[in-house]
Image (cartoon, coloured by chain):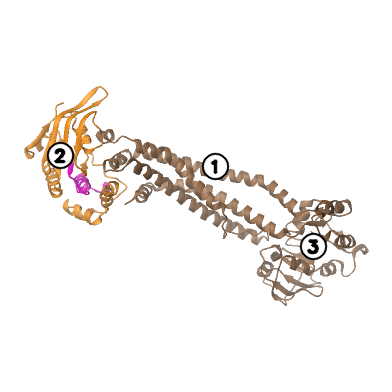
Amino acid sequence: MNLPGISLAYLRAKPLATALNLLLLALGIATITVLMLATQQIEERMGRDARGIDLVAGAKGSPMQLVLSAVFHLDAPTGNIPLDEATALAKHRLVKRAIPLALGDSYRSFRIVGTNHDYVAHYGARLADGSLWAEPMEAVLGAEAARVSGLRVGAKFAGAHGLGAGGEEHEEEPYQVVGVLAPTGTVIDRVVLTSVESVWEVHEHGKPAGGTREITALLIQYASPLAAATLPRTVNAGALQAASPAYESARLFRMIGVGVEVLRAFGLVLVLAAGLSVFIALTNALEERRYDLAVMRMLGASRLKLMGLLLVEALALSAAGALIGLALGHLLMEVLGAALRAAQQVPVTGRTFVAGEWWLLALALGVGVLAALLPAWRASRAEVAPVLAEG
Amino acid sequence: MFSLKAVRHRYGAREVLRLERFEASQGEKWLVLGPSGSGKSTLLHILAGLLRPTEGSVEVARPIGIVPQKLHLIPSLDVEQNLLLAQYLAGAKQEPARAAQVLAGVALADRAHARPHQLSHGQAQRVAVARAVMNRPRLLIADEPTSNLDDVHCAAALDLLEAQAAECGATLVVATHDARAKPRFERRLELGA
């Protein structure tokens, strides 16, 4: 017999009220947990995907769309750019490295990216099987693309026109898988890589359209910090458009940040409502248990012990609610992550923890203690003799 | 075991208790008699340390065991837990063996895990007595232990209190307005209305 034991006995004696309080708190904590897990993982993932890419040069249009399509492979490209202009930009003295990208096709919703071996090196990817492409129409699969498609080295497949499922298949120009990459935790896991020439071959049948070759974008690394000030303006002054992944990512997070904050506030309201509910439950309990509390005082309980009894009860309730909420949040995140992975979107998982979860636990316990303070103080001040005398 | 001298207690302007001297030695059995409103409960609460008298001096040997009129077992705890609670709240070491021994002494060894609502009134009263003696009190106080009991149960309740007080070597103070208890106590304090 101790304070937690007595508190649990009281909680067990009112299973419905206890369950409702737990549910309310758990829902609030779960909502905030999902948001924390999602935003942290997406930010980290986007940071990893864009690391080392200072600028994206592509066709004029929305700079955010350009970054989303060329860096994160999440949106449609803004268009194509002439190869000679891209080549000239790649040779600019302020450009340290420029990786060409030719997009347009996909295989089972995984984008086929025409590029060079620098792209593989940029993401630090290593081969799990086979070799990198050497000839046109040879393809290397990212780890996730290989896992989902089930293709192995030696297999052949036809790309489909467009970046989503259901596009017309280029059956007459099949790719052959020559390599599979090991997982990296970056965007390269979710693409099919080939040479730029392969993309040209599929779309131009060996003959350039209108006499000029095109690619979709260039991923550029600056030669010096000075380039950040001048190169984007230089690019934008010509036929191409420059977009900064860092700037556009931050802009994207500012835009979706409003929605995230609204949902976070909703979760907080649920947690505070749970606190209010605990307060009401304990205040009612105080009235219901006035004889019990008087008897406890009669049996020798100090005022501090009676305070402790209600505080421990609130703490037990809020700790249990927080832990259930955290578990529920992780479960929801895992379900959501599975759905996003199936749709080839940004992969997120519930099997990870973020430091902020400790703060969530502290928040729940704090709300529980605050909700219990007044009832606990009243319990400690209650007069014993009049209660026992009235029977 | 206890000594009350020149004790007065008032609720506002109304004096509810006036005692010049009330003293008892170890093992004595006292009956406090008086009608409702005579100050019996007030006297017991002062003896138990639950109420500080408006005036006078109080010296009581501890620990004290109390059997309240309405018994007041904690409904969310079982019988054994109610007994151990008395030790826990008094800051004493919890002894399940002592609980089993005391329950056997009140013939409730087989009801250790029953909840209060599963007990008859007689059983609940015995549990309340068992709880009061868990800490081996030097003073055992019972408030109206025979109210609403027939003669047989009245005698059984008083037998139990006397036996348990004797077992602990405790002074017994029983407060009642029930005249049936009168012949059993040589030492009596009669309070007026």
Residue A100 against residue A265 in the figure, above or below: below
Distance between the alpha carbons at the discs numbered 1 and 2 = 56 Å
Numbered label attached to residue A103: 3
Distance between the alpha carbons at the discs numbered 3 and 2 = 96 Å
Identity, as a three-letter code, of the amino acid under mark 2: Val
Chain painted orange: B
The chain under label 1 reads A
| Left or right of residue A107, residue A383 in this image | left
Identity, as a three-letter code, of the amino acid under mark 1: Val
The chain under label 3 reads A
Nearest to the observer: residue A120 or residue A258? A120
Write the start and end of the magenta stretch as one range.
B115-140
| Left or right of residue A259, residue A312 in this image | left
The rendered magenta stretch, by its main secondary structure, is classed as helix
Numbered label attached to residue A269: 1
Q: In which image quadrant can residue A183 be found?
A: bottom right
Hue used for the chain lettered A: brown
Question: Which quarter of the rendered picture does the C terminus of chain B lie within?
Answer: top left
User: What x and y, as percent, mark residue A286?
Assistant: 36, 39
Numbered label attached to residue B173: 2
At mark 3, the secondary structure is strand
The chain under label 2 reads B
